[in-house]
């Protein structure tokens, strides 16, 4: 443990490398432990998981969702991945044993509370939950550390979310919510701009397929955290496995990130020189596209997901005209592709107690047009 800490202190200039295991373990504890060991051996600083509770994420009526591995009934798959706190406690403990940091995504109040009860003080919030304001406020209350992904969002969305944090130590992750994410859309020049605007460290969550280009370019441009999916050595059926790196590929990524970071830190190379190295390897036009223009915008590949991947207000049960909406009969959920999106969370907060002027079927979004004019709180 002491030796590992000395190594980390010596290379504090390096970006933190997060191995996104997510749900690639399929709920199997031995498989999860193997992935933690693979991440540690590959050079990752952190192993990240997802505490899945299906009802916190989707309505059962969501239907099938198209993912890299094919079309699946996502709600049912999430139900299959649900595990109790003992599972996550075991993951935390094994991370400690291997001296790799444990990090986990909370999708709602119950998963966040579960992690807090395990003594966790650092949390990941995925891009679709960037606008889940109640979750953000919950994580801010105890001065936690929060890593917040900013995929499928506009600058105004990020501003609204960052404003939720008064106590937490915040890191933003630039991200494209597409699977896989096209490298040419990554617009990595935005890293410095986001850091300057919000005054916090910025990293990158990379969903592209190449193990080197985006992570290394992000490092050169000052990213403080690099997140990339890892999968078992052989092909598997995990939700994100089609875009994940094998342990060997992940080790290659770590080595390149460390090499560029070390050269920049020691002054043996410059930002321009490192970019030229990538241009020689990947081509000038390709690197130029990855750099982008630095303007925060929706990437072309995620435009269709905006308002659907993000959280909005949905009816938990069939609501008839004349019903007052409440926190008990609605929830802030992801919409995905078959249901109608509802009003975003920052609007919903002002509308609880309003009365429906028409029926809203179970699972469908509740919109302002469904409600009588309402100006107060219940």
Image (cartoon, rainbow, N blue to C red):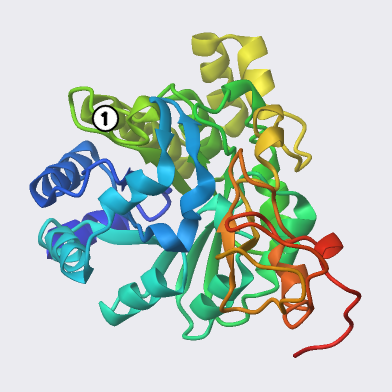
The quarter of the displayed image where residue 374 is located: bottom right
Question: Which residue ends up furthest to the bottom in the rendered image?
Answer: 378
Instruction: State the residue at coordinates (49%, 24%).
Output: 213
In this rendering, the answer to whether 306 lies above or below 359 is above
Left or right of 71? Residue 99 is: left
Residue 82 visible, this angle: yes
Instruction: State the residue at coordinates (58%, 23%).
Output: 182
Q: Where is residue 342 shown, x and y percent of the image?
A: 71, 57
The quarter of the displayed image where residue 115 is located: bottom left
Which quadrant of the rendered structure holds the C terminus? Answer: bottom right
Q: Where is residue 366 shown, x and y percent of the image?
A: 72, 61
Q: Nearer the viewer, residue 57 or 144?
A: 57
Q: Which residue is mark 1?
A: 237
Left or right of 332? Residue 210 is: left
Left or right of 60? Residue 292 is: right
Which quadrant of the rendered structure holds the N terminus? Answer: bottom left
Q: Where is residue 176 shown, x and y percent of the image?
A: 59, 37
In this rendering, the answer to whether 216 lies above or below 296 is above
Number of marks present in the image shown = 1
In this rendering, the answer to whether 54 lies above or below 214 is below
Q: Nearer the viewer, residue 254 or 208?
A: 208
Q: Nearer the viewer, residue 85 or 141?
A: 85
Please tell me whether mark 1 sits on a helix, a strand or a loop: loop
Instruction: State the residue at coordinates (81%, 63%).
Output: 370
Left or right of 179? Residue 232 is: left
Q: Where is residue 363 shown, x and y percent of the image?
A: 58, 56
How many residues crowd around disc 1 within 10 Å: few (fewer than 14), some, or many (20 or more)?
few
Residue 17 visible, this angle: no
Q: Nearer the viewer, residue 50 or 285?
A: 50
């Amino acid at each position: 443990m002491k030796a590992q800490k000395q190594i980390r202190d010596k290379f504090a200039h390096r970006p933190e490398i997060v191995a996104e295991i997510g749900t690639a373990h399929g709920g199997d504890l031995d498989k999860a432990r193997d992935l933690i060991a693979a991440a540690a051996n590959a050079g990752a600083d952190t192993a990240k998981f997802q505490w899945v509770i299906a009802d916190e994420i989707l309505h059962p009526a969501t239907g099938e969702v198209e993912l890299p591995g094919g079309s699946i009934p996502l709600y049912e798959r999430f139900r299959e991945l649900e595990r109790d706190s003992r599972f996550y406690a075991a993951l935390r403990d094994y991370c400690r044993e291997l001296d790799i940091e444990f990090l986990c995504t909370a999708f709602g109040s119950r998963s966040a509370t579960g992690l807090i009860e395990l003594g966790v003080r650092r949390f990941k919030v995925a891009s679709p939950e960037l606008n889940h304001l109640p979750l953000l406020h919950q994580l801010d209350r105890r001065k936690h550390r929060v890593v917040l992904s900013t995929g499928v969002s506009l600058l105004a969305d990020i501003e609204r979310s960052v404003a939720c944090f008064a106590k937490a130590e915040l890191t933003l992750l630039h991200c494209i919510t597409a699977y896989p994410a096209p490298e040419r859309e990554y617009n990595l020049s935005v890293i410095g701009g986001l850091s300057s605007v919000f005054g916090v460290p910025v990293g990158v969550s990379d969903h592209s397929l190449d193990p080197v280009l985006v992570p290394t370019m992000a490092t050169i441009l000052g990213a403080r955290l690099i997140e990339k999916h890892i999968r078992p050595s052989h092909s598997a059926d995990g939700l994100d496995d089609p875009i994940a790196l094998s342990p060997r590929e992940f080790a290659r990524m770590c080595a390149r990130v460390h090499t560029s970071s070390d050269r920049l830190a020691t002054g043996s190379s410059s930002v321009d020189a490192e970019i030229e190295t990538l241009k020689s390897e990947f081509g000038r036009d390709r690197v130029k596209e990855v750099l982008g223009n630095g303007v925060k915008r929706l990437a072309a590949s995620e435009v269709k997901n905006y308002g659907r991947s993000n959280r909005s207000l949905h009816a938990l049960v069939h609501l008839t005209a004349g019903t007052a909406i409440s926190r008990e009969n609605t929830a802030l959920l992801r919409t995905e592709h078959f249901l109608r999106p509802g009003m975003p969370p920052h609007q919903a907060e002002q509308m609880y107690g309003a009365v429906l002027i028409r029926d809203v079927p179970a699972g469908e979004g509740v919109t302002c047009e469904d409600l009588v004019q309402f100006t107060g709180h219940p």
